[in-house]
Image: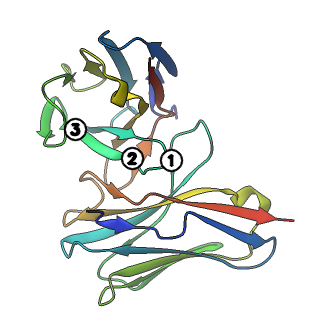
Amino acid sequence: DQQVKQNSPSLSVQEGRISILNCDYTNSMFDYFLWYKKYPAEGPTFLISISSIKDKNEDGRFTVFLNKSAKHLSLHIVPSQPGDSAVYFCAASPSGGGADGLTFGKGTHLIIQP
Amino acid sequence: EAGVVQSPRYKIIEKKQPVAFWCNPISGHNTLYWYRQNLGQGPELLIRYENEEAVDDSQLPKDRFSAERLKGVDSTLKIQPAELGDSAVYLCASSAYNEQFFGPGTRLTVL
């Protein structure tokens, strides 16, 4: 059973528009959530994170929203740029922060079209 | 600052052969992780080290997989013997606090 779910395998967005990537989780013990970005033949790169005590965290063009009651988080990228084309992974960690092993979703392939 | 280093980047072996992967974490990072990523999936944790101690190896298939981090710095992951289903990318990561930094991975193909 998948504890972290990314139900959209791919997403196509026009350059300059907003990209919204979604993630759902089932384990109530998850306390810390992260988004990673991955280019082909490279390891995942940390993008942004959020603790369960917050409902929003913003870093430049990237904002992560957390809805604990719905066990749902989303990543907003605005405006979307060609270099944002990559696979985005949602990951979660139990209490103790991201230093514990992470549970990842399957990823969403974001394609930014010119 | 140098990132997480892994070698080799690619490895092709025949089934039943042994294989080993090496990882050097970011300097000063006490926590080291090995993940396996199958095609079309997210990474899955195999083992986590705090210094030289394996604190979480519950997902490591111990019949054929082994890992070590003898001096609390670099680490080796071994598979013996390899099976066809072991074909995957093996990722190493390290962390000092909350954020995990990943290496480029080793792509293993078992024929």
Colour convention of the picture:
rainbow
In the picture, the quarter occupied by the C terminus of chain A is bottom right
Q: Judge left or right: residue B63 versus residue B67.
A: left
Give the residue type at disc 3: Ile
Decide: is A5 above or below B10: below
Q: How many marks?
A: 3
Disc 3 residue crowd, few under 14, some 14–19, many 20+, Cα 10 Å: many
- x and y, in percent, of residue A28 in the image: 20, 76
Residue A44 is marked as 1
- When asked about the image quadrant of residue B49, the answer is top left
Marks 2 and 1, Cα distance to the nearest angstrom? 9 Å
Q: Is residue A8 left or right of residue B32?
A: right
Chain under numbered label 1: A
Image point 19% across, 67% down: which residue?
A95
Asked whether the beta carbons under mark 2 and mark 1 sit within 8 Å of each other, the answer is yes
Type of amino acid at the residue the image marks with label 2: Pro
In space, the residues marked 3 and 1 are separated at their CA atoms by 17 Å
Residue B47 disc label: 3
Percent position (x, y) of residue B40? 49, 49
Label ID, residue B43? 2
Residue drawn at 30 percent across, 58 percent down: A98
Same chain under badges 3 and 2? The reply is yes
State the quadrant of the N terminus of chain A.
Answer: bottom left
Whether callout 2 and callout 1 share a subunit is answered: no
Seen in the image, is A4 located left or right of residue A84?
left
Is disc 3 in contact with disc 1, using a CB cutoff of under 8 Å? no
